Image (cartoon, rainbow, N blue to C red):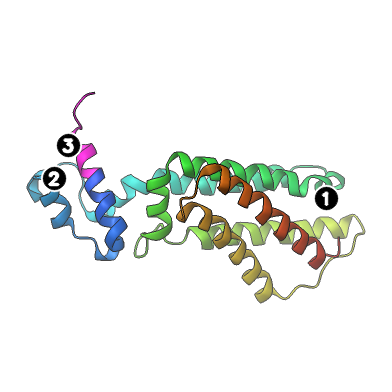
């Protein structure tokens, strides 16, 4: 087995420091010291603590947002009459894709979810909530076009329900349960939220 590169050692030390202290509390000096290098040598790899954190979580942040956005765009391109039929199926595929991706990159995705306060990555849930909210309103317009009842849902309640859904989903990743158990919980979570949304929407 080849020895760890200096970059890999920096990343492992950074993961430990960010996990234990969060981005704000993490000490670049502690990371550098634990690797046995000087601060000057570290700056040959990264310009700042922010850049180091981005190297660990940036790709995963981009994937999760892009995968979720793509699911909404694929749904919106469907003929209006098909959308009510496949609403739950398409969202389910997307959520399982995101779950499997997060488990394949578990440590870094946990950093993204638990340690990103103070970085540009801290708004992941808020960005997903906005995407989902916009898609929900677009779907309401589809229901109108189809002559189906459209719910008069309070915007604050809508925001609370959507935000709660994402926090529930990401708890599966934060708690690091076995993947098979997380998959079972996701199926139950989706059944719960789907039934609730169908009731709210009068479907």
Mark 3 / mark 2, whichever is N-terminal: 3
Image position, residue 35 (x, y; %): 13, 45
Badge number at residue 84: 1
Identify the element where label 2 is drawn: helix
Q: Secondary structure at mark 1?
A: helix
How far from the left and from the top, in percent, is residue 40?
8, 48
- Residue furthest right as drawn: 147
Q: Going 45% across and 49% down the picture, which residue do you hit?
A: 61
Q: Residue at x 58, y 41 (%)?
A: 97
Where residue 197 sits: x, y (%)?
Answer: 76, 62
- In 3D space, how far apart are the residues under numbered discs 2 and 1 (Cα atoms)? 55 Å
Residue of label 3: 6
3 and 2 marks in contact (CB < 8 Å): yes
The residue that appears at 46% across and 55% down in the rendered structure is 174
Between label 2 and label 1, give the one nearer the viewer. Answer: 2
Bounds of the magenta segment: 1-11
Verify whether residue 56 appears in magenta. no
Q: Secondary structure at mark 3?
A: helix
Residue 190 occupies quadrant: bottom right
Left/right placement of residue 34 relative to residue 88 reads left
8 displayed left or right of 65: left
Residue count near mark 3 (Cα–Cα under 10 Å), binned few <14, some 14–19, many ≥20? some
Quick one: label 3 or label 1, which is nearer the N terminus? 3
Residue 14, compared with residue 118, is above or below; it is: above
Residue holding disc 2: 35
**Can I make out residue 40 in this image?**
yes
Q: Relative to 119, is 131 on the left or the right?
A: right
Disc 3 to disc 2, how far (Cα)? Answer: 8 Å
């Amino acid at each position: 087995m080849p020895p760890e590169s200096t970059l890999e050692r920096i990343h492992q030390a950074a993961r430990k420091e960010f996990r234990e202290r969060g981005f704000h509390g993490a000490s670049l000096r502690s990371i550098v010291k634990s690797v046995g290098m000087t601060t000057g040598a570290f700056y040959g790899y990264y310009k700042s603590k922010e850049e180091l954190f981005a190297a660990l979580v940036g790709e995963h942040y981009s994937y999760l947002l892009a995968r979720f956005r793509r699911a909404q765009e694929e749904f919106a391109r469907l003929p209006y009459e098909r959308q009510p039929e496949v609403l739950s199926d398409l969202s389910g595929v997307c959520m399982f894709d995101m779950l499997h991706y997060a488990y394949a990159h578990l440590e870094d995705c946990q950093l993204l979810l638990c340690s990103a306060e103070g970085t540009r990555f801290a708004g992941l849930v808020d960005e997903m909530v906005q995407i989902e909210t916009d898609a929900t309103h677009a779907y309401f317009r589809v229901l109108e076009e189809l002559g189906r009842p459209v719910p008069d849902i309070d915007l604050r309640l809508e925001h609370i329900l959507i935000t709660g859904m994402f926090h529930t989903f990401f708890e599966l990743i934060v708690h690091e349960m076995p993947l098979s158990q997380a998959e079972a919980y996701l199926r139950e979570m989706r059944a719960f939220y789907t039934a609730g949304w169908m009731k709210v929407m009068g479907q």
